[in-house]
Amino acid sequence: MRGPDSLTIRSARLRGDADLVDIVVRDGIVSAITPAGHAGSDGTEVDAAGNLVTESFVNTHLHLDKVFTLKHLGDAALADYQSGDMGKAMSAIETAAAVKRGQDADVMLAAGRRAVAMAAYYGNTHIRALADVDSKAETRGVEVLVALRDEFAGIVDLQVVAFAQDGIIREPGTEALLRASMDLGADVVGGIPWIEYTEADMAEHVRIVFDIAVEHDAPVSMLLDDAGDPGLRTLEMMATEALRRGWTGRALAHHARAMALYPDPYFERLVALLRVAEVPVVSDPHTGPLHARVRELIAAGVNVSLGQDDISDAYYAFGRNNMLEVAFLGAHLLWMMSEADMELIYDAITVNPAAAIGRADHQISVGNQANLVVAEGHSVAEALRFHAAPRAVVSHGRLIDRARAQAMAEVPT
C-alpha cells in the first residue's frame, strides 16, 4: 500500500507561509525544504499545485474493537448516551456491553481492517485505539488490534490500549486481564474510573491502572467523567496520580465531559493541575451533548486534541476516520470559526494529538520523519470547509496507495 522511498512534493503551500516550496523526502526523512522549483529531480514526484501540505492527521481516541457494530444493537444505547444532560451515560455503557457477547474475532478483524483503511485513505496515519478488556470480551479485542497494528505497520501506526470499559472493581477479573493484555502486546493501559460505584473504588481503579503502567513502562489513557454529573472528579484523581508516580506527560485524559458543568473556581484549579501534571485532553464533541471546555483549556496552555471516538457503534452512528470531518464538526459545536480558531482546530488533529501520544517530532521539518498530507484546498479554511480526502498521503516517508486503501475501506462488514 506504499510507494517508493525517494519523493519530492512540488509547489507545496505550508501553513502560514505565502511562498510555495518543494519538500524533499529521502529514506523516510524530510531532507530539504526549498523554494518551489529549486529541488532536484529524483524518484517519485507529487505536484501539490499550490495546495496546502501539512502534517498527517492523528486520532488519539478510537474504539476500534467495536467499529460497525451499531447494526447489532439498535438505538437504545445511542438514546441514553446522547440524552441532553447525559444522565444515562452509565446505562448506555451497560447496554452497549451486549455486543461483546459472542463477538467473533474474524468479524472484528475485518471491520477493524476497513476502519484502518479508511484512516489511510483520509490521511490519518497515527491512532490510539482502544480494545475492551473484561469478562465478556476477555483479551479478544486486544489480540485483534495487535494483529491490525502489525498488518498496517508503516502505513497507519496503531497504539493498542487495553481498556477496562466496564470497570475494574465492579468487574472482577479485569485487573488480571489487563495484565495479560500487556503481555500480549498492548501498548497503553486504559481505564474508566468514573464508572465505579463509589469514590473509593474510583481511586482504586486509578491506582491499579498506574500500577500496571509502571510495571510495563507504558503510557496511560483514561476515559474520565463522561457523564452529566458535576460531582465527578476522576480527572483530578488521574492527574494527581500521574504527578505522584512521576508519570507526567504520559497520561492522556479522554472526554472529561462533566467539565462543562464544573463551577469556575474548581475548573481553574483543575487546569493548573493539568498543566503541572502535563496531562493532555482529547475531546469528542460530536459524540455527546456535553464536552470538555476546549477553548478555555487551550487558552490556559493545556494540550487539547480532537478524536473520532466511534465509528458506527452504540455511541455514534457515523464516522469514517476522517479527522478533517471531525475538525469540521468540532468547529461548529465549539463555535470556533474565526481564522485563528480554525488554526487551533487544525492543530487539534495534527501536532497536538501527536504530542499527546508521544510523537513530539510530528512536524514538517528537516530531519523529521515524513508523515504528511497534500490537502484539497489552498488554506486551512478550505481544507476544513470541504473535509475531502487528501490528494496524497505520505506515511513514514512513503506514498500510501490511496486507491487500494479506498477499495479496502469500501468492503462491507
Image (tube, rainbow, N blue to C red):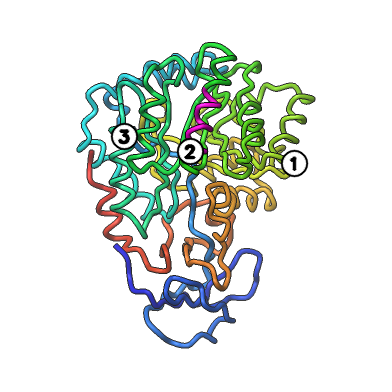
Where residue 21 appears, as percent x and y from the top left, is 57, 77
Residue type at mark 2 is Glu
Q: Earlier in the sequence, mark 2 or mark 3?
A: 3
Q: Taking 138 as reference, is 56 left or right? A: right
Check if mark 1's residue and mark 2's residue have beta carbons within 8 Å. no
Of the pair 132 and 8, the residue shown nearer to us: 132
Distance CA(mark 1)–CA(mark 2): 33 Å
Q: SS for tag 3? A: helix
Query: Mark 1 = which residue?
Result: 300
Q: Label 3: which residue?
A: 141
Residue type marked 1: Ala
* In-front residue for pair 217/266: 217
Q: Check the picture and name the quadrant holding the N terminus.
A: bottom left
Nearest to N terminus: mark 1 or mark 3: 3
Question: Which label lies toward us, 1 or 2?
Answer: 2
Q: CA distance from mark 1 to mark 3?
A: 37 Å
Q: Give the amino acid type for the residue marked by disc 3 in the picture.
A: Gly
Q: Nearer the viewer, residue 124 or 367?
A: 367
Q: What x and y, as percent, mark residue 295?
A: 69, 39
Question: In terms of sequence position, does the residue under pointer 1 or pointer 2 come before the other?
Answer: 2
Q: Which mark is residue 273?
A: none
Q: Residue furthest toward the front?
A: 215
Circle 2 sits on which residue? 215
- In the picture, residue 233 is in which quadrant? top right
**208 is within the stretch colored magenta:** yes
Whole-percent x, y for residue 342 in the image: 63, 50
Q: Is residue 43 above or below residue 282?
A: below
